[in-house]
Amino acid sequence: MRKYAANIVLAVFVVSLLIAQQKIKVFKSDKSIISYSTSTIDSLKFRGNSTVLDVYKNDKTVANFLVAEIDSVNMNGGIFVGAGSSSSMTKAMSTTSTQPNFYISSRALISSATMMTVTIGGTSVVSFIPKYGGYKFLISTPTMTKGAAYVVYTGGSYSGGTSTNNLFLGGTFSSTGATTKKSGTLSATATVNTISF
């Protein structure tokens, strides 16, 4: 049985942010592997007819994948933030990913003007503003470790550091004025952590 129905990661999301992971690998059902350096990718978008994943590259070219041909996409390092603008998007990262990650579902739209932040062990590890807003989010960073305590916030403020495509790194997050959406502990065994609020 093909795994794409359960494990496809990117094809069901309008990915608004993608940075720091050196390569994205798409494993196709014919056992071939397509690899992209993330520095060459502008964005990834799933077509409205739900059958094609388009990879928009910085050189203005577009690569296309039929969803039926995708076996799985794994998260095995680096930083990844993806936002899905439809509340019906329901796919998490592959369970064979080696780096812990979140699949977050929000009952209310997180707007394109709202910052979302994840802290691990009390330290901010990623803050971002979803380019198109979103109901579903995929988040993974190397600082997410199994069994660690986490908090997911919306709002607050960020100072210093750098900002690339609404992804904030290397600065300071302040939870003053922020809303705590969820807190808990990452799984001690699984890499996929599914939460909702």
Image: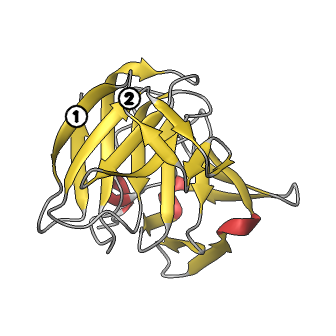
Residue at image coords 36%, 65%: 143
Which tag is nearer the camera, tag 2 or tag 1? 1
Left or right: residue 121 versus residue 133 is left
- Is the C-beta separation of discs 2 and 1 under 8 Å? no
Using a 10 Å C-alpha cutoff, classify the residue at mark 2 as few (fewer than 14 neighbours), some (14 to 19) or many (20 or more): few
Spot occupied by residue 175 in the image (x, y as percentages of width and height):
37, 32
> Disc 2 designates what residue?
88
Above or below, 63 against 154 in this view is: below
Dividing the picture into quarters, in which one does residue 179 lie?
top left
Left or right: residue 141 versus residue 92 is right
Dividing the picture into quarters, in which one does residue 120 lie?
bottom left
Q: Quadrant of the C terminus?
A: top left
Above or below, 10 against 97 in this view is: above
Callout 2: SS: loop
Residue furthest top as drawn: 108
- Tell me the distance, in whole angstroms, between the alpha carbons under discs 2 and 1: 21 Å
Spot occupied by residue 124 in the image (x, y as percentages of width and height):
39, 50
Of the residues shown, which amino acid type is indicated by label 1?
Lys
Of the residues shown, which amino acid type is indicated by label 2?
Ser
Using a 10 Å C-alpha cutoff, classify the residue at mark 1 as few (fewer than 14 neighbours), some (14 to 19) or many (20 or more): some
Residue furthest right as drawn: 59
Tell me which label, 2 or 1, sits earlier in the chain.
2
> Disc 1 designates what residue?
182
Residue at image coords 23%, 49%: 150
Callout 1: SS: strand
Looking at the picture, tell me which residue is in the foreground, 109 or 53: 109
Is residue 9 visible from the viewing direction of this image? yes
